[in-house]
Image: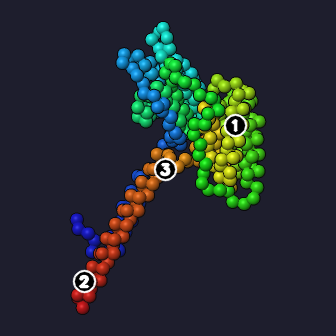
């Protein structure tokens, strides 16, 4: 079947085809935001394992952690050869995730650790909704207040009074985190904030850790509309929404410059494809229209 002789008939056909394509292309985010990679931490020391003891222990540890993630949001354990501990580790999910989402999040982490870290003696991968870490026996411990990752949105809030509103939200976060099993979310006048502490941290230590993170955010992010601060034993996240706080909370409301959700990438890819398709179609229409005019000119 040849092309329609009337360019406007071709335009109708093209628009109809484009409409059909739009109906079958998923434009919404297909991946939940809790799977976005926030940061990776890989120890500089490589794993020395001539007998395979550590590799077997790590594999066993991963299996246990993933299995536990379907019924718990925090679990800490160790694995070894029965006589001594070879490796210890834990996982933790964000407090507002369901058990199903927690499992889906945690189950990705062993693969990511293997992919992003080349068999180090210790590793930690943080997604928006969960994290996992392991340490081989004898690995040097770090302070719970150690900064692991921070990100401040480059855009500053407009108008006066923003920092006061943000600090009020921070104050509510500090007051609430100690009595909330280590996870707390709050908002004040369009500023949304949440914090979470490692599952085995005491209430007092949790409050101290969150206060430390808040102080860093106040100093280092200034008037930024959003930010994330991950310490070894806790993290905080905040965002400013001039048009109101979203109905569903999300610690990944701020997207770090170094990572983006796969759903966002899909949306951008679809936009590029549709834009390219429309451009090609428009060019063809113009050529056919010009051809039609030239033919009429020849007829004269």
Which of these two is toward me, 45 or 255?
Answer: 45
Mark closer to the observer (2, 3): 3
Which of these two is toward me, 122 or 78?
Answer: 122
Dot 2 surroundings within 10 Å: few (below 14), some, or many (20 or more)? few
Expressed as whole percent of the image width and height from the top left, the position of residue 201 reads 66, 25
Relative placement, left or right, of 100 versus 173 is: left
Residue reaching furthest to the bottom? 300
Q: Which of the two labelled residues, at mark 1 and mark 2, occupies the earlier sequence position?
A: 1
Dot 1 surroundings within 10 Å: few (below 14), some, or many (20 or more)? some
Mark closer to the observer (1, 2): 1
Image quarter hosting the C terminus: bottom left
Q: What number of labels is visible?
A: 3
Spatial separation of the CA atoms under disc 1 and disc 2: 77 Å
Q: Secondary structure at mark 1?
A: helix
Spatial separation of the CA atoms under disc 2 and disc 3: 46 Å
Which residue has dot 3 on it? Answer: 264
Residue 184 shows which numbered tag? none
Spatial separation of the CA atoms under disc 1 and disc 3: 32 Å
Q: Which of the two labelled residues, at mark 2 and mark 3, occupies the earlier sequence position?
A: 3
Expressed as whole percent of the image width and height from the top left, the position of residue 269 reads 42, 54
Q: Secondary structure at mark 2?
A: helix
Q: Secondary structure at mark 3?
A: helix
Q: Residue at x 60, y 51 (%)?
A: 153
Which residue has dot 1 on it? Answer: 212
Image quarter hosting the N terminus: bottom left
Relative placement, left or right, of 182 versus 300 is: right
Dot 3 surroundings within 10 Å: few (below 14), some, or many (20 or more)? some
Q: Is residue 264 visible?
A: yes
Relative placement, left or right, of 56 versus 239 is: left
Which residue has dot 2 on it? Answer: 295
Which of these two is toward me, 133 or 65?
Answer: 133
Expressed as whole percent of the image width and height from the top left, the position of residue 159 reads 72, 60
């Amino acid at each position: 079947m040849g092309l329609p002789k009337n360019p406007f008939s071709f335009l109708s056909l093209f628009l109809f085809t484009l409409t059909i394509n739009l109906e079958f292309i998923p434009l919404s985010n297909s991946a939940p935001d809790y799977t976005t990679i926030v940061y990776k931490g890989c120890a500089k020391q490589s794993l020395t394992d001539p007998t395979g003891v550590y590799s077997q222990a790590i594999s066993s540890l991963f299996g246990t952690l993933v299995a536990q993630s379907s019924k718990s949001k925090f679990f800490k354990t160790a694995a070894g050869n029965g006589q001594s501990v070879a490796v210890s580790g834990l996982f933790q999910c964000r407090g507002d995730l369901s058990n199903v989402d927690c499992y889906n999040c945690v189950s990705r982490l062993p693969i990511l650790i293997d992919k992003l870290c080349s068999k180090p003696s210790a590793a930690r991968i943080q997604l928006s909704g969960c994290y996992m870490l392991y340490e081989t026996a004898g690995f040097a411990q770090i302070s719970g207040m150690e900064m692991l990752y921070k990100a401040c949105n480059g855009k500053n809030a407009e108008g006066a009074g923003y920092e006061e509103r943000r600090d009020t939200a921070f104050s509510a976060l500090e007051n609430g985190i100690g009595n909330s099993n280590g996870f707390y979310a709050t908002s004040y006048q369009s500023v949304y904030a949440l914090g979470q502490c490692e599952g085995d941290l005491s209430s007092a230590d949790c409050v101290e850790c969150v206060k430390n993170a808040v102080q860093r955010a106040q100093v280092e992010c200034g008037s930024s509309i959003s930010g994330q601060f991950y310490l070894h034993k806790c993290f905080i996240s905040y965002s400013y929404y001039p048009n109101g706080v979203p109905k569903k909370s999300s610690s990944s409301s701020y997207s770090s410059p170094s990572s983006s959700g796969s759903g966002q990438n899909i949306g951008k890819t679809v936009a590029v494809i549709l834009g390219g398709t429309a451009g090609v179609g428009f060019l063809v229409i113009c050529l056919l229209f010009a051809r039609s005019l030239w033919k009429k000119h020849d007829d004269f």
